[in-house]
Amino acid sequence: MSEKQRVIVIGSGPIRIGQGIEFDYCSVHSVWALREEGYEAIIINNNPETVSTDFDTSDALFFEPLTVEDVLNLIDQVQPEGVVVQFGGQTAINLAGPLHAAGVKILGTDFRGIELAEDRKLFDALLTDLDIERPKGRAITSVPEAVEASRAIGFPLLIRPSFVLGGRAMEIVYDEEHLRRYMTYAVDVAPDRPILVDRYIVGKEVEVDCISDGTDVLIPGIMEHIEAAGVHSGDSMSVYPPVTLSRQVKDTVVEYAMRLCRGIGVVGLMNIQYVVDEHDTVYIIEVNPRASRTVPYMSKVTGVPMVSLATKCALGRTLNELGYAHGLYPERPYFAVKAPVFSFSKLTELDVSLGPEMKSTGEIMGVDPSYPHALYKAMVGSHIDVPLRGSMIATIAERDKPRALPIIRRFRELGFKVYATRGTALFLIQHGVDAQSVAKISQGSPHLLDLIREEKIDLLLNTLSPEKTVEQEGARIRRASVEHNIPCLTSLDTAEALLLALEARRAGEDFAVYALDELLQMA
């Protein structure tokens, strides 16, 4: 090693669902920024399937387990100026406490700030001080506390362990029996951490990544999720810039981000997730004091080198001297749609329904000056390649039928033949939508499964039912759709997005191919 000042970047360790290549991207770009600033960049990571562990990426690589003991031993040998934990996901962030306790300098947001964002009681107190709305919630550690919290807050509840990634063990709970079952499992997932219990708010989910130098805050852009809150952010589609948010909501999102960055003392990157209810009230639902999976996506579509800026801010540079102004970066004149990619065909017996726990293994991006065109590109890239006309199965939960009606009507107007279970078919026919009734699996052949196996179906639209027996059949149908390569949608928001894309395609509009650099020059 050279005589230069040294900085260690801690990676994310073994890749798993919910923690993967985005943190490798961030680690590599952080190393490049450190080198630009004249530092010797050292990586600690133990995954051979990443660019960050290539022999020529960093000045030195330590291929060691990301445990407290191993990392402290390496720090003792290397004697760095400091350690960067913002770019290795939750694995690296979880090391911040032990490293701080051992006297190691953490570059960027300090341990106090990380703890403020990660500890529920401290974070709630901060939100109160900053006058920021959030869903009612508590941190609990036992079944009796969970029951007491549910009675005070009211169902439905969004429950999750703290200090986990990918929405692991996160669920929406609708009654006390479900809550008690959940607690037995969740305590095993994180026995030494509190369980977070929040009121589940139905609404639009919004997300931003912030870069702060400790004073000024840069927000490269606002992302609007296409699926309603309740689907994990890694599994939902999102669009930049937002298409349905009012100016008031955008201003509130930015204002809350500014307050949070200053209140926490962010230096570097932070991710914030919001939910916006039907009255345009903005609530904070989660803050991550680190890089998120959206960083590569937003860096590419906005042209803002987010990791480089964050790393340089952690070293003491200001956004102003790096050429960036405080506030929301100007929106680009095109749309970028991020869509998840799933590996359900390779993961046997996994239910394809979407919920709070992340299941996607990758993502794709569609970019175009037209929002419907960007949607279509993203959907085709993520294997939701539905023909302009064909046949579909609709099995809709009772509570979703009113909202599903206009969606299925639009599919019918596009020329789709609609098959539906008896209750859904009757509802559709009563409201003027032609549908053919087909038997459930339990009612005997010919039934829904036969249509899928005979490859007579081009699309399955199935919303989840709270009834256990109905949902068991739904899971079998969804699994069969995967095995026969039929797109399966479990969210009506995704179905609406697909319709918008198909209608644009059906109108005969031309779809152009753009290089990303070409689009960036449009601004």
Image (tube, rainbow, N blue to C red):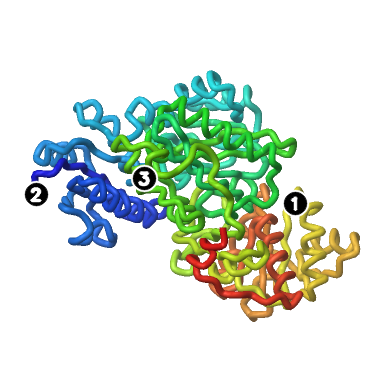
Is the residue 388 above or below the residue 163 in the image?
below
- Name the residue tied to disc 3: 89
Identify which amino acid the numbered label 1 is placed on.
Asp
> Which element is circle 2 on?
loop
Instruction: Please tell me which of labels 3 and 1 falls first in the chain.
Output: 3
Q: Position of residue 234 (x, y in %)?
A: 50, 52
Whether residues under marks 2 and 3 lie with C-beta atoms below 8 angstroms apart, the answer is no
Residue 480 visible, this orientation: no
- Name the residue tied to disc 2: 1
Q: Position of residue 59 (x, y in %)?
A: 17, 53
Is the residue 72 above or below the residue 119 in the image?
below
Along the line of sight, which residue is nearer the eye, 466 or 514? Answer: 514
Which label sits in the foreground, 2 or 3? Answer: 2
Along the line of sight, which residue is nearer the eye, 211 or 83? Answer: 211
Instruction: Please tell me which of labels 2 and 3 falls first in the chain.
Output: 2
Whether residues under marks 1 and 2 lie with C-beta atoms below 8 angstroms apart, the answer is no
Along the line of sight, which residue is nearer the eye, 516 or 421? Answer: 516
Residues at marks 2 and 3, CA–CA distance in whole angstroms: 27 Å
CA neighbours of label 3 inside 10 A, class few (<14), some (14 to 19), many (20+): many
Tell me the residue at 42%/31% (across/down).
118
- Residue 162, by quadrant, is top left
Identify which amino acid the numbered label 3 is placed on.
Gly
Which label sits in the foreground, 3 or 1? Answer: 3
- Name the residue tied to disc 1: 400
Which label sits in the foreground, 1 or 2? Answer: 2
Q: Position of residue 46 (x, y in %)?
A: 22, 53
Instruction: Please tell me which of labels 1 and 2 falls first in the chain.
Output: 2
Tell me the residue at 90%/60% (across/down).
430
Q: Position of residue 247 (x, y in %)?
A: 69, 41
Tell me the residue at 13%/41% (across/down).
74
Residue 366 visible, this orientation: yes
CA neighbours of label 2 inside 10 A, class few (<14), some (14 to 19), many (20+): few
